[in-house]
Image (cartoon, rainbow, N blue to C red):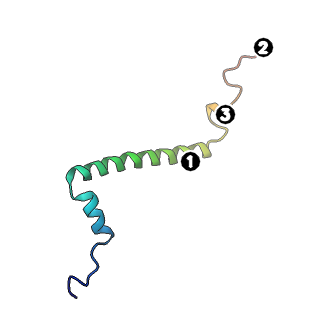
Amino acid sequence: MSPSSRRSGGLLEGLYKVVMRRTSVYATFVIVGALVGERAVDYGVRKLWEKNNVGKRYEDISVLGQRTSE
């Protein structure tokens, strides 16, 4: 198979050309990916925690902080 008949490119090669060719772009990609990933995991864990603890949280108990009238 001659090089001219091969399909140039591909997903991984395109990703390499865009992201990993320059160190500054790669470092930015890694940092931004870590920040976005951290936010996504935090959001997911928070929603799971709230779903599993409905009615048990301080915000859910309406009588806390109220004084009874004497």
Q: Where is residue 68 in the image (x, y as percent from the top left)?
A: 75, 16
Q: Is mark 2 on a helix, strand or loop?
A: loop
The answer to which image quadrant residue 50 occupies is top right
Residue toward you, 29 or 18? 18
Question: Which residue does the numbered mark 3 point to in the structure image?
Answer: 60
> Could you tell me which residue is drawn at 63 percent across and 31 percent down?
59
Question: Of tags 1 and 2, which is closer to the observer?
Answer: 1
Residue topped by disc 2 = 69
Q: Which amino acid does label 2 sit on?
A: Ser
Q: Quadrant of the C terminus?
A: top right
**Mark 3 touches mark 2? (CB < 8 Å):** no
Upstream in sequence: badge 1 or badge 2 = 1
Q: Mark 1 points at which residue?
A: 48
The answer to whether 4 is drawn above or below residue 31 in the figure is below
The N terminus - image quarter? bottom left
- The CA distance from mark 3 to mark 2 is 22 Å
